[in-house]
Structure formats: structure tokens, C-alpha cells
Amino acid sequence: MEAIVALNKVVKDYPLGKLTVQALRGVDLTIAPGEFTVIAGPSGSGKTTLLNMIGCVDVPTTGSVTIAGRETGKLKDRARAKLRLEKLGFIFQTFNLIPVLSAAQNVEFPLLLHGRLGTRERQRRVAELLEAVGLAEQARQRPNELSGGQRQRVAIARALVTEPAIVLADEPTANLDSVTGLAIIDLMKEMNARRNTTFIFSTHDEHVMAHARRMVHIADGKLAEDRALAPPAATAEAPEPGATP
Amino acid sequence: MRGLARLRILFRMAWRNLFNHKAKNTVVGLLMAFGAFLVVVGTSTLASIESAMTRSVTGSVAGHLQVYSDQARDQLALFGGGFMGASDVGTLPDFSQVKTTLLAVDNVKAVVPMGIDVAEFYTQTELDHAIESLRKALDAEDDARVARMEHKIRSMATLMAEEFGNRRKIMRTKAEIDEQLAGIRRATEDAFWQELRRDPVAGVTFLDTKLAPLVDENEGYGMQYIGTDLDAFVKSFDRFELVQGTLVPSGQRGMLVNQHFYDNSLRNRVARMFDRLRKQLHEKGKTLAGDPLLQNTVKRMVRQYRRITFQLEPEEAETLERDLKALLPEVKGNLDALVQAFLDVNDANFDARYAFFQEKIVPHIELYLFDIGDVITIRSYTRSGYPKSVNLKVYGTFTFHGLEESVLAGAHNLMDIMTFRDLYGVMTDEKRAELAEIKAEVGLADVKAENAEDALFGEASDVAATPVATTSTFDELAELKKAAKQGDAAAVERFTQDDIDHGLALNVAVLLKDPSRLEETWGALYGAIGRAKLGLQVVDWRIATGMVGQFVSLAGVVLYVALIIIFIVAIFIMNNTMVMATIERATEIGTMRAIGSRRLFILGLFFCETVILGAVAGVVGGLAGYGFMAHLGNVGIPAPSDELIFLFSGPRLFPTVDSGQVLVALALIVVISVVATLFPAWVATRIQPIVAMQAKE
Ligand SMILES: Nc1ncnc2c1ncn2[C@@H]1O[C@H](COP(=O)(O)OP(=O)(O)OP(=O)(O)O)[C@@H](O)[C@H]1O
Ligand SMILES: [Mg+2]
């Protein structure tokens, strides 16, 4: 199958005063559609930078990033926004919901930007996804009325609502306790399995890593290890996705 | 449909963001509401002042337009600007030509010729009064009064004889003073008075011509006047109101004194201060104890005690001294001390003293420098530089409705334009000769019809009619005065509308049928003037009233400058506040960008937020301004100073406000809020989606 993500000799330099920080030092990586990939590595190793490259919120200094067949470095700001809107979903470490919108409206938001669906279809999708992440009850609540885990579920629903090819998550569990964190990973896995959406996420957490199918390890801005993992033995103690943490 | 949904979410987010960023929006909202409030209050006050002023200025002196010579060296300033009367506004040698031309223009209702000038006036001396009294007593054959007047005049003559005797000693040439002394002595002798009873005409004429001119004149006072076609003036200016006396009869010379001028400049100072104190204490609720300014007035009033004591006859002085001693038993001293103590009023005794003053003092003093019906002598320097005097009867007092308290409107007195021309002094030789002839004729013809009193003085009317504008010595004055005393030519002289029209004016007030077509008529007047080659300029009342008229324009400039400054400051504050708020919202904006919002959406969100806020604040502020002005429209804004009474067209301005002003304020505020948002919104669009990734909770 053709790769949905392809990184070729990606180098990213950050100017830092007179110095430059080399966050990525030539990364080659391809990810096939439907993969559930974790990016691991110590703090400062370049995980976030790598996800930003894939997420088209930043472009490489040298090398190329190709997402769904389009090379991001060659796109204009507006075209990158369109690519993000259509092909990518984002889950943030800090959830980043829009505070003034309700859970349902947050989920609906990308669809409105999209502007392709009618009201009824939008509402159907929003309801379906909220149901899927187990927040049908909380649809009308504002983010500040939700717990961390609930917020991240809304974020997942929001990332998925446009049926993107890829969902990116930078340390989605870092601000959650371990039980909730695992539940979120389970939910992501379930979505991955059900919809065949490509998931790429970063983490420090050994427990979380254990759930991935493929683990890309980076250290010092370079790919250190890339291996497929066996499916985890026990997820029984993790709560069901539908259960409210 | 979908675009609509997007707009809806934009609007909803913007609306909710208003409540989500309370600190910022409260600051910005209050600023904008305040701005809207100011715009409504400012524009409606200005518009109200303008319309009030239009009413008072056009209805009192100015008319809608003023026409004057284009040769004028100064601008016409009906209410000051430069030194009043000293300005050179040129002349219109023949008003009739101007009148015909202007009246032919469409929308012109009336034209009124005018000339504004200042002069000194003199009241009659004590001796003048006594002679006048004697004349009346003789006429009425009131022997007792004749005897009293004889006594008075004889004692005055005795004093004069003494003084002239002293003067004689220091004179080098005695001939003239000997002759004068002979005259004075004659008036002290019994023979003269017996003779007078036999032949009153000769006797009084002697006193008038030989004795009266030897007395030094009373102090002169300045007065400003407008010489005009009085009938046309009264008819055309709807704010004119007669207060006392009568109008000047058509075709006769005479003067109408402004009631404000009469009360404030001609009234006995103690009486005026008493009334002013009473007004402050009773109407304004002040107390003497609590107001240093009023205490000061009392101090000044005490110093004016002579204005009472000097006016009393010996018997009156005795009576007052007795009454005051009864009232103030603790005061030691003579009448002067008593009156001073009496005038030193305080809160406790004010009402009683005021009543005492009205009852026991006022009837014995001259309350005014002259009375309605009196003849005063007005002296001016003509444009050719020599002095000119005329005697003029004061027929009545007037005021401009709503401007009773205004110093500016109160300064103008009115006189017939014939007298004005004499005082102004420019006349062609031809005209002068003609006039002299007419005067002589009319004067003589009239005498026959008049009563004996006039007949007594009619003989001399030709003397008064002699043109005096040809010589330029001060002797002329004495001559004039004598002439005036012998017989008041002016009082019997008649003139016609033709005389009024065929003569000099300085400026012409033009009143319109439809004032809203002022601009149009202005243009038409220029057209007509150009065609008739009259060499005139036309200004509207705003310009014609000088500084005062331009006050509205000035106030407008001040208001707009103030508003602009306030708005610039507001824009800065709003800009800063919003930039800070934008930076606080960076994650949110970055997130929206990351999940696919275009920059335009962010921009839209920001403008939507400010426009909503601006609209809400604009409506709130605008309505508050509307309510405030509507309230003031009921209670009125008191004029803070006498000058403002004029602008306010009365002691209180009742402003009007209309919804147009609220809409203007609203539109302005929305525009300003958009301007203030430009930079913060731009900053927001520069926020990179990557910011969302770097967020730390
Ligand atoms: N905007 C930036 N400017 C300068 N240096 C940066 C910037 N972003 C990242 N870096 C540097 O690049 C390197 C990689 O950072 P990155 O955030 O990708 O690491 P990470 O693996 O995500 O770390 P962590 O686990 O702490 O999130 C670090 O040394 C970091 O300091
Ligand atoms: Mg990171």
C-alpha cells in the first residue's frame, strides 16, 4: 500500500539566539494508511517537531514531507490550512478545545470550516462521534464543565469528525492520570480499528507505548529504532471507552 | 446555507467571546459607550445652541443676512469683535438703492437699514432741571411751585456768583467774565423775578441762554446704539419687546433704551446692588455668611453711600436721619455714618433693610440717570473728526425676548436713523442744505399746531437746524447746547419714509421669508448686487455677529477636536487591550488555525467581536446620551455666564435631541471599533498553528 506519510531526510533547525538548535537531523520515515504508530523518545529528542512536520503546522528546513501525496514545504499557507482541514486531525496534549463552544459545537467546528455538509448530516456525525467517545450526555456542556479525560475525548471526536486520513496526537495522555490515559489510548485504538484511520502519537509513557503496533524511537533528532510490536496481552483492566473516567 | 452556518458559528463565537473576556470587553465597551454618549450629547448640544442662537440673533438685531460695503476695512461685528463702534465697515451712501435691489430678490421679506456707533451722553444738570420745573410751573400757573423754583434757582445763582467772582480774580481778560457775572447777578435779583412773572418767555429764555450754559455739564457716559428705521425694525425683529414707555412716533426723532442697559448702567448703584443681593439670597438660596463674593458686594455697597446722601434735599436728609436713628439706635454719628451702617447688611437683617430701602429711600432718590421721557444730550465725534451733539428724547425701554439678561444683547440701544446720520456726520453739501431748509420749514409749521410750551421755544428752531458740521471747533459745542436749550428742534422735526430711505446707512439687515433657503438667497443677493453694481458684500448672521456668531463654529471645532482626541486615545487603549487579549488567546487561535481555520476566519471573528461590542456599546451610550439630553430638554441647561445667555437664547437652553444623532454616534463608534481592531486582528492572523502544539497547561 502506498505511504500516506513520507519523510525524506527531514532536517529542522531552530534558531536560538546566535546558535541553531537542530531538532531533527535527517529523518526518513514512511507510514502506511491505517497504521497505529507511537513516536517515543526522551524529552527534547524531537518528537513534537516531527509531529509538527507531519501535521503541516511547520515545514522542514531541508528534506521533504509528503502527506497524502502532497509535499507540504511547497504549499502556501492557505493550501496547508486546507490540507490540515481535510486530511488531518489533531489531538493536543492540552486538549485545546474552544472554550466558548459546547462539546458538540467543538466537534462540529471543523465541519463548519469544511462547509461541505448540511446541518442534518453534521448533527448526525457529531452525535455519532460523541456517542462513540461516550459523551452523548455531555454534548451541551462547555469544556470547563468537563474533566480532563472527557475533554480529550471531545478532542478525539473533533479530530475524527472530518474523517481525516491521519490523526496526530502529541502526548495525548500527558495531562491525564494513567488509568484515564490508557482509556484514551484504547479509544484511539478502537477508532483506528473501526475506521482505519492512521494514528500517529508521541509519548513518554511506557504503558502507553505498549499499546502501539509500531514504535518509532527517536533520540537526538534521529531515528534510533523502528519496530513493530505485538498486540498487548492485557487491556482488560482498562475501562471501556464508553465509561466515564 | 453552509456559508450561513459558518457565519452563525462566527457570530456565536464572537458573542460568547464577549462574555468570556470580561475585563477586556468592559474596558473597551465602556470607552465606546462613553464615546457614543459624548457624540450624542455634543452634537445635540451644539445643534441646539445653534438653533437657539439662530433664533436670538436673527430675531434681535442681525436678521438672516447682513449687507454692507465691500470697501469696508473691518468685518461687520454686530456683537463685538474689535472695539465696538471703532470698526470701519464702510458706508452705504444711499440706502434706497440698496433697498430696492434687495427687496426685488426672491425670498427677501424685509430689509432694515442700520448703523452702529458709540457716543457719550449727558444728562441735564440740576439747574437744567430747575429751569424745566420752573417753566412747567409758570405754564401751569402754580404760584407756590414757581416760588419754590425761584428760591432754588436764586440760591444756585448766588453760589455761582461767588464762584465766578473767585474766578474773576485769576483771569487776565475780565471782559467776558464780567458779562457772565452780570448775567448771574441778575438772576439773584428780585427785579428779575418780578419781571419774569410778567413775561415768562423772556425770563425763562434768559435763564436758559445766559445762566444754564455757565454750569459745568454733568459727567458723560458711554452708550452704544443702533441707528435704524425704527418702524421697520420693530416690525421685522420678532424678539423686540417694548418694556416701558412708548415707541418713537413714526417720522420723529427719538431713542429707545435697552432695558438691560437701563437697569445695569443707568440705575442707582445702591439700588442695583440691593436687588442683586436679594436675587442671590432669595432665588439662588445663597447666604451672605457663606459667600465671600456676596460679602464683597455688601462692602462695595457700603462704599456707595454717597449715591444716596448726595441726592437728598435738606428736609429729606433730616427725615431719613431721624428714621435711621430709630432703626439703628446704637450708631453714633451723622447721616453718612448712619447710611453706611444701614447698608452693611447681613443675613438676619437683609429683608427688613431691603423693605426700608424701598419704602424710605427709593422715593427720594433718582433711581436712574435719566427717566423715560427725558431728553438727553448725545455727543459723538463725527467721522470727519469734529464733535457733534444732539438732544434726543428717550421714549421708552425695550428688550429682546429671551435675552433680557444678556449683556451682549443688552448693550444695543436704538435711535432713529436721522439722528444717527447727524452723529455719524457724513453728509453731502446738497443734502445738508436741503435738510436745513426742511427743518426750518417743518419746525416753524409745527409750532403753530403745538401748544404754547412749544411756541415758547419754537422761535429758536432755525438756530438748531443750522448745519454745524462745517466748523470744527469746540465752540460749536457750546453753540449747540445753547441751541438745544433754546428749543428742541429735533423734537418737532418730522421726517418721512423717503428721508429715511434716501440717506446713509452702514449695514442692512435682510430678513427672509424662508430661513432654510438662506444659502440660496445669499447667492441670489450677490447676483442682484453684482448686476446693480452696488459694491456690497453679504454675510450671514453667523459671520455678521462677529466673535459671538463664530462661537458656534468655534464650539463645533472644539467639540470635534475633543472628540477626535478622545477617540484617538480610545483607539490606543482599545488597541492595546485587544492586542494583550489576543496574545492571551494565542493557543485558542493557534488551535483553530491548526485544525484548519483560514486567516480570514480569524479576522472575521475579531471584527465580528468588535462590531458586536461596538454596536452594543454604541446603542447603550447613544441611548444614555439621548436620555440625558431629553432630560436636559425638560429641565434646561442654565447659562453659566451672561455671554452664554445670548447663545442659549435665554437664561436656560432647552436642548433637543433626535434619533439621527444617536445613529450617527452608533455608526461612528462601530467605525472606530473596527479601526481599533485592525492591528490586533492582524496580530491574530499572524499566530501560527504551531502555537497550539506548544501550549502548556
Ligand atoms: N520553536 C523552537 N525554537 C527553538 N528550539 C526549539 C523549538 N521547538 C523545539 N526546539 C528544540 O528542539 C528540540 C526538540 O524539541 P521537541 O519539542 O521536538 O522535543 P520533544 O521530544 O517533543 O520533547 P518533549 O518530550 O519535552 O516534548 C529541543 O532541543 C527543543 O529545545
Ligand atoms: Mg514534545
Image: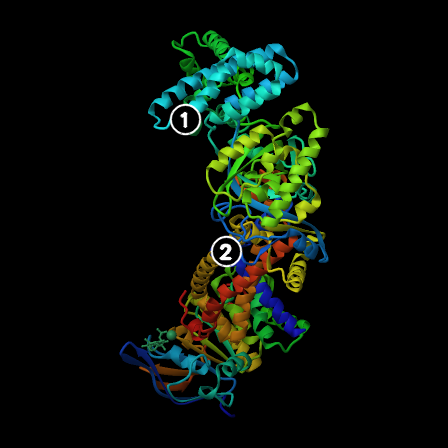
Amino acid type, callout 2: Arg
Name of the residue lying farthest toward the left: A18
Q: Please report the residue visible at 58 percent of the width from the left and 67 percent of the height from the top.
A: B10
Decide which of tag 1 and tag 2 comes sooner along the chain.
Answer: 2
**Label 2: element kind:** loop
Residue A170 as seen in the image, left or right of residue B411: left
Label 1 amino acid? Ala
Quadrant in which the C terminus of chain B is drawn: bottom left
Q: Nearer the viewer, residue B427 or A106?
A: B427
Q: Nearer the viewer, residue A243 or B182?
A: B182
Q: Which residue is mark 2?
A: B73
Quadrant housing the N terminus of chain B: bottom right
Q: Nearer the viewer, residue B129 or B308?
A: B129
Q: In this orientation, which residue lies closer to the viewer: B9 or B87?
A: B87
Please say which color scheme the image uses: rainbow
Q: Rounded to the nearest whole Å, what is the CA distance between mark 1 and mark 2?
A: 50 Å
Residue that extends furthest to the bottom in the rendered view of this protein: A1
Q: Is residue B676 above or below residue B463?
A: below
Identify the mark at residue A147; answer none if there is no mark: none
**Mark 2, residues whose alpha carbon is within 10 Å: few (<14), some, or many (≥20)?**
few
In this view, B417 is above or below B37 = above
Dot 1: chain letter = B
Disc 1 target residue: B175
